[in-house]
Image: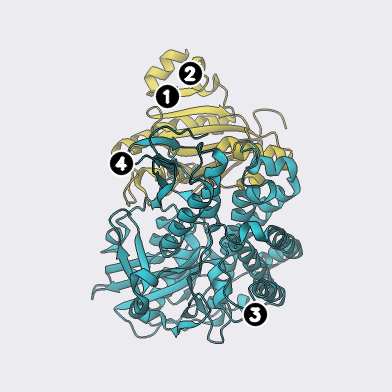
Chain colours: A yellow, B cyan
Amino acid sequence: MPEGTADILLIGYGNPGRLDDGLGPAIAARVAELDLADVTVDSDYQLTVEDAAAIAEHEVVIFADADAAGPEPFSFRPVEPQRGDGFSTHSIEPAAVLALARDLFNASTRGYILGIRGYEFNEFGEALSEKARANLHSALDFIEPRLRQRDFEPSAAGGDLHPTRGYATINGEQACATEST
Amino acid sequence: MVSTSDAKRIVIEPVTRVEGHGKVTILLDEANRVQQARLHIVEFRGFERFIQGRPYWEVPVLVQRLCGICPVSHHLCAAKAVDRLVGGESLTPTAEKMRRLMHYGQFFQSHTLHFFHLCSPDLLFGFDSDPALRNVVGVIQKHPDLAKQAVMMRKFGQEVIKVTAGKKIHGTGAIPGGINKNLSIEERDALLNDMDQMLQWSRGALRIARDYTLQHLEEVRDFGSFESNHLSIVRADGALDIYDGGLRAIDADGNRIFDHVGNQAYLEQIAEEVKSWSYMKFPFIRSLGPEDGWYRVGPLARINTCDFIDTPEADGARKEFMALTEGKPNHITMAYHWARMIETLHAAEKIRDLLNDPDLQGEDLVVKGEKRREAVGIIEAPRGTLFHHYRINENDQVVMANLIVSTTSNNEPMNRAVRKVAEQHISGNAEITEGMLNHVEVAIRAYDPCLSCATHALGRMPLTVELVDHEGKVIDRRAKD
């Protein structure tokens, strides 16, 4: 399948009962509402090993998750398969599940992490914090054109990635656009 | 690697391949002898408060947010309590069988993942083997077929849940007094296509766990093991039943402490103790008191307490399991794995039988009766007995909720296991190695504790282990992500 026309899987994960931990499922729900062609959307409480089988059936996978300490409002970066010994819970990290897809299913799926900055995690509650909601909107504005164009390289859709750091750190749309153009 | 100094306190943080958040603290004296070893579980509090004021019919969905690891168990346990609130506890055959199918799917995927991806590295490579290989990476390298089986078995279990519970995050399958859908022929046939394979792989997994235990019997017999009481629900005829039944508790010799206790009367038999050093409560059997009344739950307890299993292959495996201890309760901590794989095969047999049951295509999905203001639901979650207790007001709002999760019941046993392994493998050694500390983790992992009920966001750590000297100074910490 030629690059740019691939089927895409977006997995938004987190616990919507833990305040900003629900950012992943929240963006998955928003993307699902867009009903984009060739984009499959899934959401779960956490990333798990069986996701490797679904990932192996797609050319591109985007892992959308809340980020407890990452840059604001979000970051977007490619992730390479990496076998890890950090299967510390029933959930696993994106690099490790990509490695499973590669090692067990001979997949060459390209992976990206969309880490949306969150702030409140340690209480029960179903609402995102105000700042997290703003970050969610920024992330959605960023990812939607890329999903439509099926292109996730730094120059895509306005080119607001931050190549010098090896991944996209989006500190606001204006700043990103300035840096990347 | 863990270093030592004049100071003598070990803290393991996080314990790897264990759910959620927690901390092990090992206190040494000046001669490196273990003085104290404790597992601290960082339990998020406030759920009972969070749920107060919410209408009761939302509870089966809301409680899934309690734990991202086993949402189905909370969903079904809450649903059983809410059934009573609406007077609908006598479900239609279609509703009960759909719920059971969901529950067996949850058991199948949970047990499988725990065994292959969290525990098998220790069993396949040894507790002291190279930590670079003693993980799922090593399993993939050495046993890629097993690693793939685990993924596909987990996927199958998730598919069962999907067709019975609906969406993964907003599962709404169980509703007050019933279920919101039946199983279509297409859904049934899709699952049946994989059924023989799942049964075959389940038999293989059971064989690995059984053979490991028998081949390493001298090594595991005393490893973190101790005599204890055991508790679970059992069916009216004494059969293993993970969805419904009365409470049965047995002592270390297998004598019944109580039997067929109705779910609504659990507080007459079970109480909870608070200890100053732990966030978690310590449940105990009232008649024995907090000192002697602690008990184990989960696969080992269930196999010990039940009289038989109502599927032939799993019951054959149970008989062999019980023969090892001549019919008396098995207290070997590492035998949790063998028991867990017996239950995995049982779940597969049950799923097969249910898929072939035409009741699953029935149309009668919901019943209702006379409303109540208070109700208890009890279910066997993969990790052990789960209690949900709710009270509502005249406006149908929850005014009281009390939950006892299985890891809470296993709190005291896990602490004893940690203490014993620390004494067996750490005490008196001049140098504390990674392999020694892994022994502690192996003992904890046997219980498959769910320390979760927590967030998992990027950058979050699940658990810590600390080494602390006799003056209270932390001299080492261990952490992996």
Whole-angstrom CA distance, mark 1 to mark 2, is 8 Å
Name which residue type carries label 2.
His
For label 1, the SS is strand
Q: Are marks 1 and 3 on the same chain?
A: no
Pick the front one: B354 or A161? B354
Q: Residue at x 34, y 38 (%)?
A: A133
Q: Which mark is residue B310?
A: 3
Q: Nearer the viewer, mark 4 or mark 3?
A: 3
Chain of the residue that carries numbered disc 4 in the rendered image:
A
Q: Quadrant of residue B358?
A: bottom right
Q: Are marks 4 and 1 on the same chain?
A: yes
From the image, tell me which residue sits under label 2.
A162
Whole-angstrom CA distance, mark 3 to mark 2, is 60 Å
Chain of the residue that carries numbered disc 3 in the rendered image:
B
Mark 4 vs 3: CB contact within 8 A:
no
From the image, tell me which residue sits under label 1.
A170
Q: Nearer the viewer, mark 1 or mark 3?
A: 3
Name which residue type carries label 4.
Ser
Q: Earlier in the sequence, mark 1 or mark 2?
A: 2
Whole-angstrom CA distance, mark 4 to mark 1, is 19 Å
Mark 3 vs 2: CB contact within 8 A:
no
Whole-angstrom CA distance, mark 2 to mark 4, is 26 Å
Residue B98 is situated, as x and y percent measured from the top left of the image, at: 56, 72
Structural crowding at the residue carrying mark 1, measured as other residues with C-alpha within 10 Å and reported as few (<14), some (14–19) or many (≥20): many
Q: Residue at x 36, y 64 (%)?
A: B282
For label 3, the SS is loop
Query: Height in image: B350 above or below B202?
Result: below
Mark 1 vs 2: CB contact within 8 A:
yes
Residue A105 in sight: no
